[in-house]
């Protein structure tokens, strides 16, 4: 990290950002071009979870190449200065890398979806109709490395 004074080294602070952030951006390789999508997500035991439709560009890309980069942030306020180049933004962010995988079994899908529901609704568990589980794709990402950054 170029600006080492902004690096967050405390794993608990990085985890707090992951828990507080509402949107995760997942970057994938689309041939020689990048492809990024925002997703709702949750993190547990060094795995990131999200859900999506069972088909589409994201699914096609991840089947070909499961390597991903992800980013979450908690935006803050703009710090205005008299000189334009001295303006800055307060923020906390986490960038990480990992390998995506498809969660197939109904019980495994329920566990991952419960982690997501706990984050967004506060509920420990939910009921899922079998046909709903069949229609949804649930993804995990084994987090291989990540770093945090804070400004302001």
Image (tube, rainbow, N blue to C red):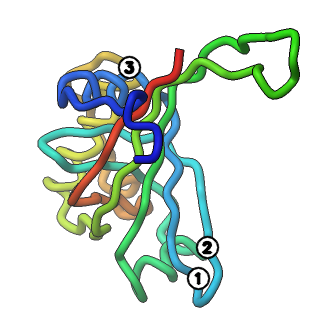
Label 3, label 1: how many angstroms apart (C-alpha)? 33 Å
Q: Position of residue 45 (x, y in %)?
A: 12, 42
Label 2, label 1: how many angstroms apart (C-alpha)? 6 Å
Front tag of 3 and 1: 1
Q: Position of residue 117 (x, y in %)?
A: 33, 30
Q: Which mark is residue 121?
A: 3
Front-lying residue, 115 or 74: 74
Name the residue: 52% across, 78% down. Answer: 29
Q: Under tag 2, what secondary structure?
A: strand
Front-lying residue, 29 or 61: 29
Q: Under tag 3, what secondary structure?
A: helix
Graded by Cα atoms within 10 Å as few (under 14), some (14 to 19) or many (20 or more), the crowding at tag 2 reads few
Q: Which residue is mark 2?
A: 34
Q: Which mark is residue 30?
A: 1
Name the residue: 33% across, 46% down. Answer: 129
Q: Are discs 2 and 1 less than 8 Å apart at CB?
A: yes
Label 2, label 3: how many angstroms apart (C-alpha)? 32 Å
Graded by Cα atoms within 10 Å as few (under 14), some (14 to 19) or many (20 or more), the crowding at tag 1 reads some
Q: Would residue 60 be found to the left or right of residue 87 on screen?
A: left
Q: Position of residue 7 (x, y in %)?
A: 36, 33
């Amino acid at each position: 990290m170029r600006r080492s004074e902004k690096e967050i080294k405390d794993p608990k602070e990085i985890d707090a950002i992951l828990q507080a952030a509402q949107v995760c951006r997942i970057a994938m390789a689309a041939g020689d071009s990048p492809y990024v999508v925002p997703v709702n997500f949750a993190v547990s035991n060094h795995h990131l979870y999200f859900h999506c439709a069972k088909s589409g560009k994201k699914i096609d890309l991840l089947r070909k190449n499961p390597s991903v980069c992800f980013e979450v942030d908690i935006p803050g306020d703009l710090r205005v200065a008299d000189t334009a180049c001295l303006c800055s933004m307060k923020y906390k962010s986490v960038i990480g890398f990992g390998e995506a995988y498809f969660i197939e079994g109904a019980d495994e899908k329920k566990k991952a979806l419960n982690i997501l529901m706990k984050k967004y609704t506060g509920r420990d568990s939910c009921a899922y109709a079998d046909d709903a589980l069949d229609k949804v794709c649930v993804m995990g990402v084994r987090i291989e490395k990540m770093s945090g950054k804070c400004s302001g």
